[in-house]
Amino acid sequence: MKLRQKINLYTAVLFVVLLILMNVSIYLVFSNLMITNELDRAKAETTKIAKDVSANVRHISPGELLRAYVPIDGKIEILKEGQGKGTAVTDESEQRLMTRESSFYHGETSEIITYQQKKYVFVSSPIVWTDGSIVNLQMMKSNQPTEDMLTVLRIVLIVVTIIAMIPVLISSSILSNFIARPIRSMINTMKEIQTSGQFKRINLEKKSQDELVEMGNTFNHMIDLLQANFEKQEQFVSNASHELKTPLTIIESYASLLKRRGLERPDLFNESIEAIHSEAIRMKEMTEQLLLLAKNQEQWNIEKENINLTDTMTELAKVYQNAYKRTVEIESSETVEVISDVQKLKQLLFIFLDNARKYSDEHISVYIGKTSDEPYLRIEDRGIGIPKEDLPKIFDRFYRVDKARTRKQGGSGLGLSMAKEIADALDIRIEIDSLEGRGTTVTLFFVV
């Protein structure tokens, strides 16, 4: 069953059940009120008759006296204790009541009784008889007028319920269509996306602010994210394929050259081996960087601890100077401590130191301090710099400011992308300033 049909069915059933419960309650309350009213009237009438009978029974025979008070469609009777039948008078239309066995009651009694499938109002009231004994003055009165009114009421309520079901069904259908419309639009949009392979969005009514519009906005936002990620993925795959194709082509060319002339020319053999080895290492590093970049922040396994930033940078600078024979000058006016992952931090600093080494020939300067209680570490080089228009793109994967230069130096365009990922995982803010031909300054701000 479709959602629209379920909403239509459940809404209609709920309304019908509520309507039936309401009408049943109305009927029961009205029926109880009418029956109570009939009993009260009969009791009041019996009490009055009992007084009149007590006052006149010495002067008028009981039969004649009761005949004056016999109710229409009913019976009146004086019954002594121990008698099955007493002195009774009935209306001509209710002669069958004369065959009913009577019962003596010691107190006042009123109720609705059924005799020969017909309902009567029955009231019994004790009175003092001429000989000083207690007798019952019992009156039975047909309850048929009340029953007829209740029957009419039942018919009216049933008809009203049936008639009321028509607008209920119509309104539930309209409601289900209103609720299901954006859902159906979303389903159709999904099917169109599946069929065409193109990302599409739902047209929404901006005037409404209900949950259905919120659901549509969430769907459109999800499509925006999917489209953006899809485009990034396409670009990433295209760039990765391009980047890997170059070293593979170089390796294939040198391998073919070795196959043809490697044994004849030792110098060519050494050149080919070096080239193949260099490209293999670069492919390995690129693959490792791609795998790191594919991780989410939760997969970095960050283990933060208290770190002396000056000591960590000094230790890393010594290793760097020994490996690359480049001078790294560190200036720190005070002891600066941060909470971070020491291994990830060293990896982040190494990326920026390596970039400074690649694009400058002079010494590298590192400044450590605090600004407004915010620790920072600034790395400065005096190299070629980055054009102003390229600064917003430097964290894009595979992006190069100067493709010829970075290719010669072995860069893959992934270093800064990975640095951004690591910095985000460590809650470090990166700011880069550069002037073409003068050098680049990278500042890392640590969250306290």
Image (cartoon, rainbow, N blue to C red):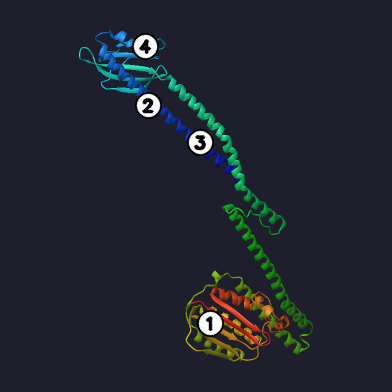
| Label 4: how many Cα within 10 Å (few below 14, some 14–19, many 20+) | many
Whole-angstrom CA distance, mark 2 to mark 4, is 24 Å
The numbered dot on residue 83 is: none
Q: Residue at x 68, y 66 (%)?
A: 231
Type of the residue with mark 2: Thr
Which numbered dot is residue 36? 2
Residue 200 in the image: x percent, y percent?
A: 68, 58
Dot label at residue 90: 4
Q: Position of residue 292 (x, y in %)?
A: 60, 74
Q: Earlier in the sequence, mark 4 or mark 3?
A: 3
**Marking on residue 376:** 1
Instruction: Mark 2 vs mark 3: give the one in front.
Output: 2
| Residue under numbered circle 3 | 19
The span from disc 3 to disc 1 (Cα, nearest Å) is 72 Å
Task: Measure the C-alpha gap from mark 2 to mark 1.
Answer: 90 Å
Q: Position of residue 265 (x, y in %)?
A: 77, 89
Mark 2 and mark 4 lie on one chain; the one further toward the N terminus is 2
